[in-house]
Image (tube, rainbow, N blue to C red):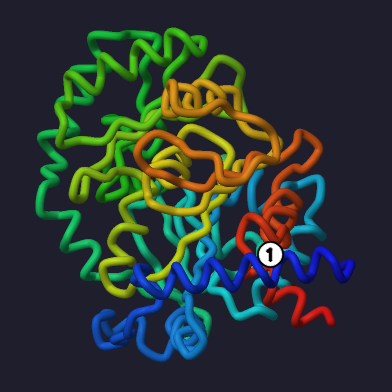
Amino acid sequence: MSEIIKEEILAQIELEEKEARLKDPEWQELSPENFPECYQNTSFLKKIIAQAAEGPREVLISDIDWTFYHKDIPEETDRLYQTLEKVGIPVCYCTGRDLERVTGQPDLPQPDLAITAVGTEIWVRQQDDSFQKDPLYRERLLQDWQRDKIYQLAQDCVQQNPNVLVFQDRDKPENQGKPEMPTPEEFKISLYFYGGQEEARKMEEKMKELFGGEIGIVFSTNWREENCFYVDILPKLEAKTGKAMPIHYLKSLAGFRSIVAGDGGNDADMLFGSGSQAIVVGNFLPEMPGIISSLSEKEADWRPNLTGFKVGESRNDVYLAAKEDIGPRAILKALIRGDFNPHFARKITEISS
Ligand SMILES: [Mg+2]
């Protein structure tokens, strides 16, 4: 890195840190006892505490498929993971997968937290590398979630829209209780929608109306099948849904700066509605431009590689990667840029010099 760039970065950091100290909760005192028992003595909390000594605290929260992990460049997932390890930033996955499909993939590095089932379960990695579910988060989500009632509504919805709305295997009524089938998830009811972008948008509106404001409806492209979307029916936690919920919850336990990364519709809540710095990978899914323009309206245009991009009310910094910067490559590129996250960029400079 050239001296001039280094100096520019340092000047920016100084300015940012001054401002941050005044208002950011991630600089304020940390109370590890706010965290449930399953977090104590874990790598996640240890990294948070170690950062707190220097402040600000930062956490990377990333989608897995085609984002943190891209099957064409698995070595870049490793490189990204090693970098985060070196600078001591906790790695959290936030995925539609269940825990088995996170821990069961040998070439996927194990995260400090695995947030699974589209933000509805938080699993904390223990010292022996097993994962424990956060029971306090579960309790919070249970408050406004009546699964049987919502499942009934989903069944009505499927009946009214035959052929285009279909339950995913684990939620099919005829599969319930079958031992060979994965068990339904407590806070997630999942369907497929068959149709194009425009039809999906209309169906999403229709379902939001039917299920009402207390329930989250999340559409995301199914990259395995053309003209097919994943549809997740989810709880809400203080008006947040999907992948924004766990971030909101974790920040209520301790202030930290979240850097999030994703590629598709089910990442939208965390990218643009969780008060995070957002990285959109270059291989984003087809719904992403529509999501961004619906959020940005008059206020902003969207340009590649622009930081400080403001979206809607969330006032996020968004890094939109160039097309060739796919998955983990986009994340690392964003993180080492002095103007996206100067604090992280400085840490990288320190460890590589
Ligand atoms: Mg994805």
Locate residue 219: give its quadrant. Answer: top left
Name the residue at 22% across, 62% down.
138
Check disc 1 and report the residue beneath it.
106
Locate residue 147: give its quadrant. Answer: top left
Quarter of the image where the C terminus is located: bottom right
Name the residue at 82% across, 79% down.
352
Question: 41 or 247, which is in the foreground?
Answer: 247
Name the residue at 42% across, 55% down.
116
Seen as rendered, the residue at the extreme right is: 2
| Left or right of 348, for residue 12 | left
Q: Is residue 179 above or below residue 157?
A: below
Question: 319 or 77, which is in the foreground?
Answer: 319
Name the residue at 67% across, 60% down.
335
Ligand 1 - quadrant of the structure image: top right
- Measured from the top left, where is residue 336 in percent x and y? 73, 62
Q: Is residue 148 above or below residue 61?
A: above
Secondary structure category for the residue under label 1: loop
In this rendering, the count of numbered labels is 1
| Left or right of 39, for residue 278 | right
- Measured from the top left, where is residue 175 in percent x and y? 33, 35
Quarter of the image where the N terminus is located: bottom right
